[in-house]
Image (cartoon, rainbow, N blue to C red):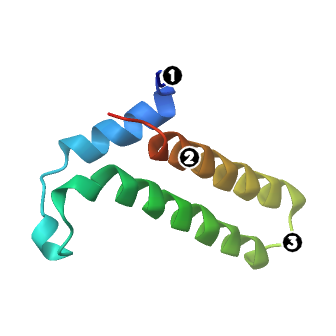
Amino acid sequence: MNSPLSPAAKAVLNAYVAAPPDHSVYDLPPDCGIRALAAALLVTADRVEDLISDTGHPEFTQGVLAAAHFLNLIATELKTTNV
């Protein structure tokens, strides 16, 4: 049995579900939705870390790393859910 999703993961999933389906744009089968969403979040988290090179301010770096970690947590949660 899966544990309930966190509020952050629920918000991301709800936004995805509310979006009109348009699988034809990417030729994605309808059943890969949540896996694709999780993959997109993982890539986003990875790319967010690219912002660190734009500034040397340590608090900015900490904030970027925290945001990347948060996106990774949400993606992992979505990958392991059975909704």
Locate the C terminus by quadrant.
top left
The one of 31 and 40 positioned closer to us in this rendering: 31
Whether residue 67 sits left or right of residue 13 in the image: it is right
Mark 1 vs mark 3: in front: 1
Question: Mark 1 or mark 3: which comes first in sequence?
Answer: 1
Using the image, tell me which numbered label, if any, was put on residue 82: none
Helix, strand or loop at label 3? It is loop
Image coordinates of residue 64 in percent, x first then y, are 71, 58
Label 2 amino acid? Answer: Thr
Helix, strand or loop at label 1? It is loop
Mark 2 vs mark 3: in front: 2
Q: Residues within 10 Å of mark 3 (few under 14, many from 20)?
A: few
Using the image, tell me which numbered label, if any, was put on residue 76: 2
Q: Disc 3 designates what residue?
A: 56
The residue sitting at 17% across, 75% down in the picture is 27
Q: Disc 1 designates what residue?
A: 3
Helix, strand or loop at label 2? It is helix
Question: Mark 2 or mark 3: which comes first in sequence?
Answer: 3
Q: CA distance from mark 2 to mark 3?
A: 29 Å
Label 3 amino acid? Answer: Gly
Question: Mark 2 or mark 1: which comes first in sequence?
Answer: 1
Image coordinates of residue 53 in percent, x first then y, are 77, 78
Label 1 amino acid? Answer: Ser
Image coordinates of residue 70 in percent, x first then y, are 63, 45
Q: Residue furthest front?
A: 1
- Badges 1 and 3: C-beta atoms under 8 Å apart? no
Establish if 8 lies above or below 48: above
The residue sitting at 49% across, 41% down in the picture is 80
Whether residue 33 sits left or right of residue 51 in the image: it is left
Image coordinates of residue 3 in percent, x first then y, are 51, 22
